[in-house]
């Protein structure tokens, strides 16, 4: 499992971002995309202008603007790199032709998100304030945390609860034995995106004390999407407004209370034992097909690129465990090889998906010829 930031580094960055970010509700008829040198790079680049504000545009906001005005991403990106003036003209035309009210979220003078006015802000600072005291109260250790451009992650383990997965025969000839037992602890990941990259979610899972792999399971997850009612109307004369703390609250106290309860539930021992039992069962489900083909089909199913597919195959063969359990471990082990923390976290969830595949889908992979 990738370690990311220390909990102190994470808290420092969350507090810094809380001070530096601003949110605006803007009628698209009152904003324009313009070419500017706000970044002082000597090159004119597309920026957003509204009222007396001029902001750079981040990658996510560009993607969301393109979606909003229905410009295909490939063409939008080409205009951005080769013909920024044409991009500005296209975007401004469609903004005016199809007016709407949007939420623009900024950080450090850059528009980091361009969202519907129904978007419900559920911010990292409030989430951390809700869950970190609960984790401390439970005696959990935060073993990995990060705040990327897209998402916040807090991953914590309860090492006071331990279950052993027994060693056994896993090679297909029945003569080779995996002799090392594995020790599993309950694990939770609390994650959130402030800019529209997925829901606020709490994922329950397991931490392997032997190899430090982490895995998260869909059946032990809770999601809360950032959708609410439209924010309070403003007059036609008011071209934009910055959201107040009061308007952003949106009765979130009840939500944070629920999140705290879900985090506590992620460490329920009975539910953890049931999950461990399911994982143990995968040891007796061999890969009967051609191993490279099994990994190839797995890569196609879960969207691995060529490098990721090769890493999974290498770890599967090196581990010597040609079973569903071995494939699950190869996927979660690959997470540690990935530079991008967001992608590594996706692999930890995909490891859980391997275990949770329905029987018919698993047979299609395991019997690949």
Image: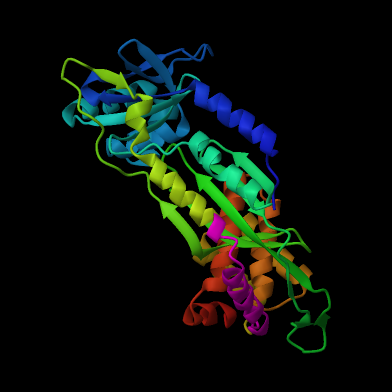
Display coloring? rainbow
Does any portion of residue 200 appear in the rendered image? no
Quadrant containing the C terminus is bottom right
- Identify the residue at horizontal 57%, vertical 83% (top origin): 367
Image-based side of 296 in relation to 321, left or right: left
Q: How many marks?
A: 0
Q: Position of residue 178 (x, y in %)?
A: 80, 78
Toward the front, the furthest residue is 137
In the shown orientation, is residue 87 left or right of residue 311?
left
Main SS of residues in magenta:
helix
Rendering quarter of residue 279:
bottom right
User: Is residue 285 visible in this depiction of the protein?
Assistant: yes
> Residue placed at 32% from the left, 23% from the top?
88
Q: Is residue 142 above or below residue 89?
A: below
280 vs 25, left or right, is right
Query: Magenta segment, which residues?
Result: 264-287
Q: Residue at x 77, y 74 (%)?
A: 320
The answer to whether residue 269 is magenta is: yes
**Depth check, front residue: 269 or 242:** 269
Q: Residue furthest bottom?
A: 174
Q: Nearer the viewer, residue 15 or 181?
A: 15
| Percent coordinates x, y for residue 338 in the rendering | 66, 50
Residue 184: name its quadrant: bottom right
**Residue 218 % position (x, y):** 50, 64
Does residue 180 lie above or below 262 as drawn?
below
């Amino acid at each position: 499992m990738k370690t990311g930031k220390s909990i102190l580094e994470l808290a420092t960055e969350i507090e810094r971002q809380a001070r530096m970010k601003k949110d605006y509700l803007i009628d698209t008829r009152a904003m324009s995309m313009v070419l500017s040198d706000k970044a002082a790079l000597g090159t004119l680049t597309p920026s957003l202008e509204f009222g007396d504000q001029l902001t750079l545009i981040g990658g996510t906001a560009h993607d969301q603007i393109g979606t909003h005005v229905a410009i295909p991403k490939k063409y939008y990106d080409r205009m951005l790199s080769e013909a920024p003036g044409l991009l500005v003209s296209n975007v401004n035309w469609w903004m005016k032709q199809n007016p709407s009210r949007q939420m623009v979220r900024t950080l450090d003078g850059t528009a980091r998100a361009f969202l519907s006015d129904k978007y419900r802000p559920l911010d990292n600072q409030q989430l951390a304030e809700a869950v970190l005291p609960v984790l401390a109260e439970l005696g959990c250790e935060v073993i990995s945390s990060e705040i990327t451009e897209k998402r916040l992650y807090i991953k914590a383990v309860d090492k006071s609860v331990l279950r052993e997965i027994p060693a056994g025969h896993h090679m297909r000839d029945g003569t080779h034995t995996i002799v090392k037992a594995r020790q599993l602890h309950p694990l939770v990941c609390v994650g959130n995106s402030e800019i529209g990259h997925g829901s606020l979610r709490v994922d329950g899972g397991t931490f392997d004390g032997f190899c430090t792999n982490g895995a998260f399971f869909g059946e032990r997850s809770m999601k809360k999407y950032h959708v609410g009612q439209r924010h309070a109307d403003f007059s036609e004369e008011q071209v934009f407004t910055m959201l107040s703390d009061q308007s952003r609250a949106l009765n979130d106290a009840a939500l944070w209370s629920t999140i705290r309860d879900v985090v506590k539930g992620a460490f329920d021992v009975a539910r953890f034992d049931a999950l461990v039992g399911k994982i143990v069962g995968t040891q007796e489900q061999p890969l009967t097909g051609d191993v490279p083909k099994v990994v190839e089909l797995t890569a196609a199913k879960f969207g691995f690129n060529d490098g990721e597919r090769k890493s999974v195959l290498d770890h599967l063969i090196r581990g010597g465990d040609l079973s569903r359990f071995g494939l699950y471990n190869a996927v979660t082990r690959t997470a540690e090889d990935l530079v991008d923390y967001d992608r590594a976290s996706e692999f930890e969830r995909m490891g859980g998906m391997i275990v949770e595949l329905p029987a018919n889908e698993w047979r299609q992979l395991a019997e690949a010829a």
